[in-house]
Amino acid sequence: MSSPVSPLGSSVLFHGPWTVPLLAGLLVLGVAPPGLSGARTTVAAPVHDDFDGDGYQDLAVGAPGATIGGRSRAGYVVVLYGGPHGLSKNRRTVISRSTRGIPGAPVQEQGFGAQLTKADLNHDGRTDLVVGLARMKGDAVVVWGGSRGLTGGTSVPATKTQAGDFDGDGTDDLALFRTDRSMVDDPRGSTGTVWTGPLSRSGTPAAERALDPGHLKHYDIVAGATGDVNGDGRDDLALQVYIGDGGYGTRFYTASAAGLTDATDTAPPGDGASALGDVDGDGYDDLVVGFTNTARIRVARGSAAGLRPESTWKSYSQNTPGVPGTADEINGFGDVLAVGDITGDGIDDVAVGVLRQEIRYEDGAGTVDVLRGSRTGLTGQGAQAISQDTEGVVGTSEAGDVFGSAVQLLDINGNGYADLAISAAGEDAGNGRVWLLRGRPTGVVTDAALVLDGRAVGAPYARAGFGQALR
């Protein structure tokens, strides 16, 4: 076991000696496997989202507002490693531009950790982490997975990234975007490149090609998601983009042997987040898109022919029977999404961050709604609303907490149920906090809740925006 060191110097790795079979926001700078019924003991294939190869999924937490090396809003990332008892603050790696092996030095307002991507980029059976930036002030960094967790880093020419097997060869590929956050009405414009995997540790891909230069030059990339909507073994790509004048939209690309092809006209044109997962259990990923201006999400179901036509798309909101709350155009419903199988029935569920939800007249307190998947698609039946007022969730709902700033679903203890990570980047005057709630056949439960912030993991915490990104 390695010794703890300062997060401002080299990475902190507390890694227990467990041995088990090997087995997709809001920037606050100033304010699974299906159908398992019991504990997992053997698995035939490597687990996704597993940095250390121990068979358990791991959680990455971005804190892009933190001061590092005297540089304000330079940012860092904390990785919490899963295990048979879940996450622990004692098994972690803290990564910043001051960490040994990470290229570069802390840069003011770079926002290292504002966006995170997971993929096995060098095809060694362990997941790697790509740390993206809030602003175009340098390069993203691939931090490499290994038997003792994440170590070492390689710069890649991007601000934000997305990953998937876009060509269906069994190796993860990386989509890289040079993009920035526009401070005016007009977008700054973006460039996109797809690197074919595997990548070498020097950052060299097997091949590369430009992605949609004719359109992306008009947009800023905000976020994205990947998944296979037609079951052809190739991952498709959805992007949330800033289109100007305060508006946002969706770009969608389908994958083929020839690369990613623009299919935006086949996808819901929402202004919120996108997520891909199988919410009806038919073997095809479905596209979930937020429409925050009307406080709803829309689901386009996948099929062998791709996304089904618009006439079949279904909408869900806080006015949907069974979904707690009342639809409100300013509460942020659909700004944040995550997909995973919480109940272990082999069908993905959807977590919706409602980060500006008013609670007891506390504006922007925030909540998370969880909608269940079923054989007939997403449903409001059995839906849950979770906030800091929920029994078992530590804290109190307060104005500006933005509980639900980010959400992520991961099976961190290998029991077949996806667990729900929720952040409130505005908590404690912008310090930020993350909660992990367990998944069960009945849904999300709070009886084994874990709560973490920068202070708890020995990292800078003042106005860090801890949890602004979760992956």
Image (cartoon, rainbow, N blue to C red):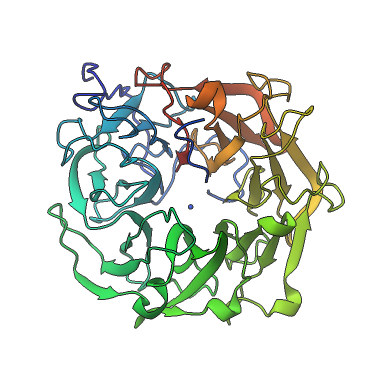
Instruction: Give the answer, above or below, for where 325 lies relative to 244.
Output: above
Judge by depth and name the residue closer to the eye, 59 or 320: 320
In the picture, the quarter occupied by the C terminus is top left
Q: Residue at x 73, y 54 (%)?
A: 295
Judge by depth and name the residue closer to the eye, 457 or 199: 457
In the image, is 40 to the left or to the right of 91? right
Q: Which residue is drawn at 77% across and 44% down?
A: 383
Q: Which of the 4 image quarters holds residue 248? A: bottom right
Instruction: Give the answer, above or below, for where 42 lies relative to 197.
Output: above
Give how far across and how far down residue 1 sits, in percent.
23, 19
In the image, is 177 to the left or to the right of 328? left
Q: Residue at x 39, y 51 (%)?
A: 45
Whether residue 334 can be seen here: yes
Judge by depth and name the residue closer to the eye, 135 or 202: 135
In the image, is 453 to the left or to the right of 10? right
Instruction: Give the answer, above or below, for where 341 lies relative to 108.
Output: below
Give how far across and how far down residue 196 sits, in percent.
26, 68
Whether residue 240 can be seen here: no
Q: Which of the 4 image quarters holds residue 214? A: bottom left
Q: Farthest residue to the front: give it.
A: 184
